[in-house]
Amino acid sequence: MAVVIDGKQVAHSYRMKLKEEVARLKEQRIQPQLTVILIGEDPASQSYVRGKEKAAKEIGMDSELIRLPAETTESELLHLIDRLNVDASVHGILVQLPLPDHIDESKVIFAISPEKDVDGFHPVSVGKMMIGEPTFLPCTPNGILHLVKEMNVPIAGQHVVVVGRSQIVGKPVGMLFLNESATVSYCHSKTKDLGAMTRQADILIVAVGVPKLITADMVKPDAVVIDVGVNRVDGKLVGDVEFDTVQDVASMITPVPGGVGPMTITMLLHNTIEAAR
Ligand code: GUN
């Protein structure tokens, strides 16, 4: 039976360290501050944003939530970002995605000052990550890397197979593990024989949003399985991995919820403290 990786516990101990960091900054009269912009009423986004606010408060960080109606225009949003970019009391800016269809997501991401880009989505941040320079790393990929390191899983030379190629998770997580000298393969909806690929993985990272996509026969014995999926099935939160069968094959596995999720917010807090510094 696989060890179930306790993301909540790892996130909690990391946040305790961040809390001390915040206290130290406050002694230097620096009050770390995160501004979150939420447009519209998407229930999942509202729930994510509440989680971010709560986590910020718990470590003594200031956070402001700016709620805007779904009809907000692109130019209104860009003006708001311009204002926050020059506001010295704001250290981090996060625009919750997805945005309504009439707003160009890339334009919005480009508009955020790279110095306040705590999501790590700005092309300057992405470019620096690509060449391995210090920068704001995207929160979910960095949370996964931290979790794997915390479990003392060897990375260099290991075969990491990433299923999914989103800008937020799949693509960057492969890059982070490549920077750690893993051998990295990407799979996606056009991959011909998914099982043949995933069975080669020493570390299998799945981020596609398809419940039960990964079954036990697709996992190499003793692989480490990281499930990034967040799917609601019959009112219940489930990942992309068929947990009950895969846990008999894998050596370690992240649960959903309580695996990767808590790490994402933790890395956002980490980035905001870096921005304040
Ligand atoms: N929507 C889903 N995940 C994320 C994230 O990490 N950052 C932002 N800004 N929006 C998201």
Image (spheres, rainbow, N blue to C red):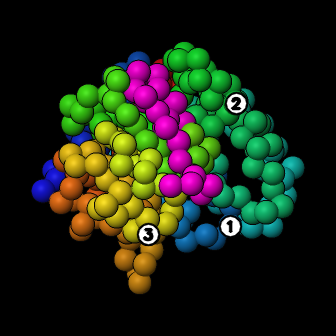
Residue at left 79%, top 63%?
Answer: 101
In the image shown, does 9 or 276 lie closer to the viewer? Answer: 9
Q: Is mark 3 within 8 Å of ligand 1?
A: no
Q: Which mark is residue 123?
A: 2
Q: Please say whether residue 249 is visible from this viewpoint.
A: yes
Query: Disc 3 designates what residue?
Result: 211
Q: Please say whether residue 168 is visible from this viewpoint.
A: no
In the image shown, does 243 or 6 lie closer to the viewer? Answer: 243
Magenta region, residue range: 172-193
Labels 1 & 3 near each other (Cβ < 8 A): no
Q: Give the percent coordinates (x, y) of residue 111.
A: 77, 36
Q: Give the percent coordinates (x, y) of residue 235.
A: 41, 81
Residue at left 36%, top 49%?
Answer: 199
Q: Is residue 131 above or below residue 123?
A: above
Residue at left 31%, top 61%?
Answer: 217
In the image shown, does 73 or 125 lie closer to the viewer? Answer: 125
- Does residue 18 appear left or right of residue 126 in this picture? left
Amino acid type, label 1: Gly
Query: Disc 1 designates what residue?
Result: 40
Q: Earlier in the sequence, mark 3 or mark 2?
A: 2
Residue at left 49%, top 38%?
Answer: 185
Give the secondary structure at mark 2. helix
- CA separation in Å, label 1 and label 3: 26 Å
- Does residue 31 appear left or right of residue 60 in this picture? right
For mark 2, does the 10 Å Cα neighbourhood hold few (<14), some (14 to 19), or many (20 or more) residues?
A: few
Q: Is residue 181 above or below residue 239?
A: above
- CA separation in Å, label 3 and label 2: 31 Å
Magenta span contains residue 192: yes
Foreground disc of the pair 1, 2: 2
Q: Give the percent coordinates (x, y) of residue 152.
A: 21, 31
Farthest residue to the left: give it. 1
